[in-house]
Amino acid sequence: MAYRWISFTSDYGLHDGFVAACHGVIAGIAPDVRVLDVTHLVPPQQLRSGAAVLAQTVPSLPKAVHLAVVDPGVGTERRGIVVVATHGILVGPDNGLLLPAAEALGGVYAAYVIDVRTPTSATFHGRDIFAPTAARLAMGAHPGSFGPAIRDLVRLPEPMVAAFPGKLVSDVLTVDHFGNVQLAATPADLDLTGLTGEVTVHSEHVAVSAALGRTFADVPRGANLVYTDSAGKLAVAVNGGSAASVLRIGPAEECTITASPTAS
């Protein structure tokens, strides 16, 4: 099956030529296939953030080959893989990055190791292995043509979420361009705490008051808000500002929400 689209997610950044090199490889193999860049600003080597961004984005994309590279183990014995999901194909390292997106695309149907037969750079498998594989898949190559089938895919540890009466503790999944802090917790987790109205949000460094609300304008400019984001996760925001800066917090760190000292 051929695909008109390749989506591309990485932690390569925009300062260097890494993204362009991968685009060039794809264009050389599949010149009529369009590349849709999801983001290349995943925090360096932050697998959980990359996995979350990809999984939350793929349901909105056209049917595609999804190329994703956040690869702290590049050049080691970690495998490169092709994952066939119900509604798309994913290509990247076997380090847990791809599986949440595969589940968002209907679940894993099959998976294959990419059997590398030609010399490659030890540090740029995005260009030398994953981009060519994605391009050939988009041109109609069978996923099983790249190597043997496998079942023992690497999975990321589940993010920590713990709900108690009056207290919710959660790992941070992502921080977006606006500084909104997305938690692994959901509104259902918050419901278990019984928290309502005003709350206190704690990071390792600071605690701030916040309101539980629906959208940013529910609080005055500069005030803090806990809301449900577009991916259905709880998030912390500052109306007109950056919650990540206020809380001094980032992906993979821990955030706690408790009752406000002034709450009745």
Image (cartoon, rainbow, N blue to C red):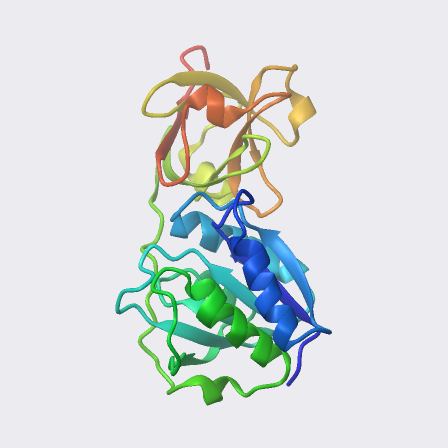
Where residue 188 sits: x, y (%)? 48, 44
Look at the picture and state if 171 lies above or below 224. below
Residue that extends furthest to the left in the rendered view of this protein: 77
Residue 206 as seen in the image, left or right of residue 230: left
Residue 261 visible from this viewpoint: yes
Name which quarter of the figure residue 172 lies in. top left
Res 64 seen here? no
Q: How many marks?
A: 0
Identity of the residue drawn at 55% across and 60% down: 21
Front-most of residues 25 and 234 = 25
Q: Residue furthest right?
A: 32
Q: Which residue is found at the position 41% from the left and 79% from the top?
A: 114
Position of residue 162 relative to residue 123, above or below, is above
Q: Is residue 249 left or right of residue 32?
A: left
The image shows residue 138 at horizontal and vertical percentages of: 62, 77
Q: Nearer the viewer, residue 31 or 140?
A: 31
Q: Which is nearer the eye, 213 or 217?
A: 217
What is the quadrant of residue 164 in the picture?
Answer: top left
**Residue extending farthest top:** 262
Q: Residue 241 lies in what quarter of the image?
A: top right
Q: Position of residue 207 (x, y in %)?
A: 39, 18
Q: Quadrant of the N terminus?
A: bottom right
**Residue at 62% across, 85% down:** 140
